[in-house]
Amino acid sequence: MKARLQNRKIVLGVSGGIAAYKACTLCRLLVKLGADVHVVMTEAATHLVGKATFEALSGHPVGVEIFSQAQRISHISLVKDADLMIIAPATANTLAKFTAGIADNLMTAAFLAATCPVAVAPAMNVNMYRNAATQENIQTLKRRGVYVLNPASGPLACGVNAEGRLPEPEEICEFICTILGERLTLKVDPLLPKPQKPLELMQTKLLNPAFGAGLKVLITAGPTIEDLDPVRFISNRSSGKMGYALALAFKNCGAEVTLVSGPVNIKAPEGVKLVCVRSAQDMLTAVDSLAGEQDIVVGAAAVADYRSLSVAKDKIKKQDGVDELCLHLIKNPDIIASVGMREVNRPYTVGFAAETSHTEENAQSKLIRKHLDLIVLNNVAKKEIGFDSNDNEVTVFNKDGKVAHFKTQPKSIIAERLVKLIIESFKACL
Ligand code: CTP
């Protein structure tokens, strides 16, 4: 299989934050995915991680100073033909220089000269991050088309527990793949045509904003739990992996994501708003209150179709001499159908169809019955792509028929491709 980043030139900028050490793993992961990685560091970063480390990991000399005779790396040649420039970690100082257009070191000069997409992963002390100057700089960069990967929350080097951490290298790597994956499929014309006009006039055109920037997306995920008594319940084997992968992929496209999730054993991606629910009715209440303000709602939850008519207050006891127990179950509300049928503020509505037989017919009739815009068919009878597996294979339909088929591959990649398709289909309806 072709490595995901094969033939991609990535310029990795490392500025002087304590998280610079994580950039080593990021560099290694990018190289492993086939990318040709060129590292540029600020002078401050070299006090935290040695140039030699990045030289060994990337296989290329590492640039720091503009006028270094020894290095002979120019800011122009560094970004020439690059597919992406990513700054991780991006300190408050470097972000401020990017915003102001200051070019006083090799990295800031390369940033100004870059015509490829640029992404930044801010990481710093929480107060520096929350400072109005930093926040305004980040907003300005976003407006100019720079992709921003929000910092994670957790223990910071300064000892407090708050936002400001550099996301894990694996997450940054996914973010990069999403940006480049998106551009790869859009690449009918050369990725970034050589500017015909002076560069300063082209700059904002060349740096497209993130594909999903400004979109509000809600995703339901995981199973629901329908209680029978204080210790027993009805549920299903949904792991939530597909819904959570979609949440990450939407977030990486710049969308504002809310995940309404039944109980699962996985962590919600950083930067995604998590609403935890238990039963189908809880999920309906949460979705109902939020759906009207969303652009897109995706129903990836495996909602229990039935619940007990009543939940016993005390544990249901065995009866001597009685060999059968009948449960009186009643139908749960259909959550995604309630979104699809909204008459006002109806978001673009996407559902999943978990089927084992007559898969295509069942999926298409579900699309109509639930008033969906798109339906993603999952053949859950296939063991290798069933519940709890890491892979999936899906076919997508709209009311006119089949629109895409994604063969068996990791759920994270399926999620990226689905997100791209969903956003494109949503935009086509505007
Ligand atoms: N769904 C929902 N609320 C329900 C049942 C399902 O929102 N009470 C959503 C799921 O999240 C999914 C879609 O409807 O997006 C289809 O779910 P699926 O389990 O395939 O179908 P069901 O509607 O439950 O029908 P059946 O079990 O008869 O196939």
Image (cartoon, grey):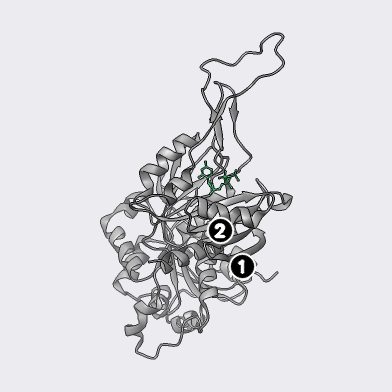
Q: Quadrant of residue 321?
A: top right
Residue 58, compared with residue 378, is above or below; it is below
Q: Amino acid at mark 2?
A: Ala
Q: Estimate the spatial distance between the alpha carbons at disc 2 and disc 1, rounded to whole Å.
A: 30 Å
Residue 399 numbered mark, or none: none
Circle 1 crowding by C-alpha within 10 Å: few under 14, some 14–19, many from 20: some
For residue 271, say whether it is visible.
no
Indicate which label's residue lies in the foreground, 2 or 1.
Answer: 2
Residue at x 58%, y 25% (from the top left corner): 328
Judge from the rendering whether residue 25 lies leftward or rightward of residue 46; answer left or right.
right
Q: Position of residue 30 (x, y in %)?
A: 59, 66
**Residue count near mark 2 (Cα–Cα under 10 Å), binned few <14, some 14–19, many ≥20:** many
Q: Amino acid at mark 1?
A: Leu
| Element marked by disc 2 | helix
The foreground one among 370 and 86 is 370
User: Which element is circle 1 on?
Assistant: helix
Q: Residue at x 48, y 59 (%)?
A: 373
Q: Which mark is residue 57?
A: 1
Percent across and percent down for residue 119 are 44, 67
Q: Is residue 286 visible?
A: yes
Looking at marks 2 and 1 on the same chain, the residue that comes earlier in the sequence is marked by 1
Could you say which is closer to the camera, residue 139 or residue 16? 139
Q: Is residue 17 above or below residue 207?
A: above
Residue placed farthest to the bottom in the image? 196
Q: Quadrant of ligand 1?
A: top right
Question: In the rendered view, would you say 61 is above or below 299?
Answer: below
Residue 237 percent location from the top left of the image: 64, 40
Q: Read off the residue under disc 2.
A: 415
Q: Residue at x 43, y 82 (%)?
A: 67
Query: Which quadrant is the N terminus positioned in?
Result: bottom right
